[in-house]
Amino acid sequence: MISVLMCVYNESESILSQSITSIKEQSNSEWELIIVNDNPDDKNLSKFLMQIKKNDPRINIFTNEHNYGLVTSLNIAFSKAQGEYIARMDADDVANNKRLEKQIEFLEKNNLDFIFSNVQSIDESGEIHKEKVLPATDLIDSDKIKDIMSFTDIAFHPTWFMKKPVMTELNGYRSINSAEDYDFVIRAIRAGLHLGYQGEVLLQYRYRLGSISRNNTLRQEKINTILQKGLTEDESWNDWSIKQVNDLKIREQEEKKLNRILQSGVQFKNSKKISSGCELFVRMLLYPKGIKPVFRKITVDKRIREIFYK
């Protein structure tokens, strides 16, 4: 059986219903969906979830006493899991109806421990932004995956599929808010687990304007730098990385400046207009520290492709 872990907080009933329905309509019916409600004060959400549970006994709802956050909620969900496989699913994404079937086949066929797949990106209204975000080529070369993870995270969290002992061995998620998934993947690589990337698009990944990563770009950049050292540092990284993340302090003004620069960078990358390029150049002159993260954002796709196809 496959245990699908989901945390809900402020998703609309319409979006949440789409996500849950995409699991209910899976071609592989041997699953349980464990939903942790991290918004106990929202009575309408609780009522909606209980109605969902009534209609399908494979769905289990657990409501937190307080708002504990994603990391704690997912660890709670895992503690309730009965399946031999663990899959992740976000409450605002939509899974391909053969996702679980194809993932278990890919994992077993290639003798892997932990896999993730390609995604199609959609906006908040469900409109397609990119038909596929990453290369459509499967990747089961551990060294190449490690190389890519050393500068960016391609393991889209809601596409994860793994053997249950993986989560047990890594002791679930660590308390690294907004980068708990990147941290988990790096620890999996350090543990010598066999990872694989499935190039087929198996999920519609919804980009929300209010997501944590979009509002805390500078913090995210600094956390990622700390985590990436886990691929080269010794055993002590486990301890000092947590301390450095917890001690991290970001100036609000710096965060705003970098966010504006990155927005300009994305506009220039998409439009290639001279006006967008000029705006990006001026903002980088006003905040030189933003040059490095902008360059990484603009060139990351090229670097990923180079490793995939070398």
Image: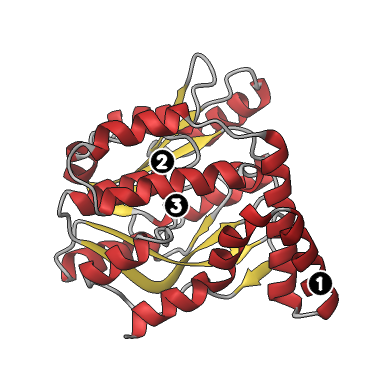
- Going from N to C along the chain, the mark reached first, 1 or 3, is 3
For residue 88, the mark is: none
Q: Amino acid at mark 2?
A: Glu
Report the residue at 49% width, 45% height from top.
Answer: 222
Image location (x, y in percent) of residue 256: 72, 44
Image location (x, y in percent) of residue 244: 40, 33
- Going from N to C along the chain, the mark reached first, 1 or 2, is 2
Q: Quadrant of residue 262?
A: bottom right
Q: In this view of the protein, which residue sits in the foreground, 286 or 265?
A: 286
Q: In this view of the protein, which residue sits in the foreground, 176 or 68?
A: 176
The residue mark sitting in front, 1 or 3, is 1
Location of residue 175 with respect to 284 vertically, above or below: above
Mark 2, secondary structure of its residue: helix
For residue 278, the mark is: 1
Q: Amino acid at mark 3?
A: Pro
Mark 3, secondary structure of its residue: helix
Image location (x, y in percent) of residue 180: 41, 40
